[in-house]
Image (cartoon, rainbow, N blue to C red):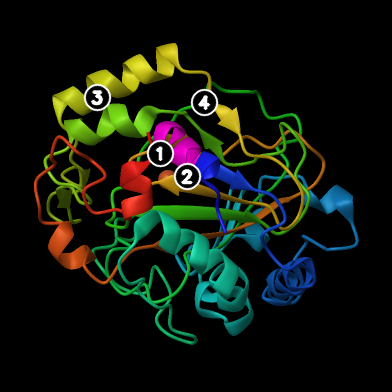
Amino acid sequence: MLNAEQIRFFKTQGYLIVPGAMDTALCRRVRDLMWQALPPNTRLQPNDPASFVGPFSEQDESSDERHMRADYRWLNRFLGVNADVIRLIYSEFICQMAQQLLGGRLRQAVVDGSPMGSHGPAWPGGPTDPALGNEGARGVYCTLPYGNKAREADGCHTDGHPFQLGIVGLLDDCPADGGAFKVWPGSHTRLFPTFALRYDQPRVPYYPHLPAFKGISHSEAYKAELSRIIDEVEPVECYGQAGDIVFWHHRLAHAAGQNYSEQIRQAVLADFWTNDLDTLRTKPVTANMWEDWSPALQRAG
Ligand SMILES: [Fe+2]
């Protein structure tokens, strides 16, 4: 269970790393499932590290949102409803810690349910709205090594779909500069008041006759605060060993790290929310951003 210091850290920093929270034998099993999901004749091969370097060759690409392979990203959302993945990331131990932070009753993931990306207002070239139809974890997200790709400035963002608590779990060891999840500490308390709604925001679906009129709508206050955060806050890279997890707050600024290691960054991503989310997401933001969270978290000072 989380101690008072960890709960306080999460509250003030917006994230919390818990080393060794996942079963490493199950991590290995899920890594195998990733390789098994590739079609035959894929150039990317588990026993050939030279083949890991991105971007994906044209032959290996897939635009299916549920098993996407493009550029340096390899996202398997089908695995988000796989029994082993749900056992791994929604283990009793991890759910108990999430419950300590969130309070309430946690929504339960459904084995073999509908994976993220199955339906919803899909945006050509962009993400499918995961607010609809995701009954499991987000899935297994991998980042191929960047090789000699030029280094770019870190962008960061908050996620548009409704949930309360995110989690990223390392399925394999991930060194510094190896594409680990990146967070901007404390940004959750600065960004939360710039939204109209606590756990949601206006999203414009894709209309074929209005192709540019799509995406997530942000307030001017949000855009101004996010650029101040980028100027002022040093991001933290959540690298570590297979089995390590990081919890993060819904409104925390974050980014997928750039992978300048020689190995594939392999992680499982999932969201937590309580059964009240559909009511809470429609409520306006309040001065106390922890109103819907556990009493222990509310008390942490
Ligand atoms: Fe994100």
Cβ–Cβ below 8 Å for labels 1 and 2? yes
Quadrant into which the C terminus falls: top left
Q: What residue span does the magenta drawing correspond to?
A: 7-15
Whichever of callouts 4 and 1 sits on the residue coming sooner in the sequence is 1
Disc 4, SS: loop
Whichever of callouts 3 and 1 sits on the residue coming sooner in the sequence is 1
Give, as a three-letter code, the residue at label 1.
Lys
Query: Is ligand 1 less than 8 Å from the beta carbon at label 1?
Result: no
Give, as a three-letter code, the residue at label 3.
Lys
Disc 2/disc 3 C-alpha distance (Å): 29 Å
Disc 4/disc 3 C-alpha distance (Å): 16 Å
In the figure, is residue 42 to the left or right of 162? right
Query: Is ligand 1 less than 8 Å from the beta carbon at label 2?
Result: no
Q: Residue 7's mark?
A: 2
Give, as a three-letter code, the residue at label 2.
Ile
Please tell me whether residue 114 is drawn above or below residue 2 in the rendered image: below
Disc 1/disc 2 C-alpha distance (Å): 6 Å
Q: Nearer the viewer, residue 28 or 165?
A: 165
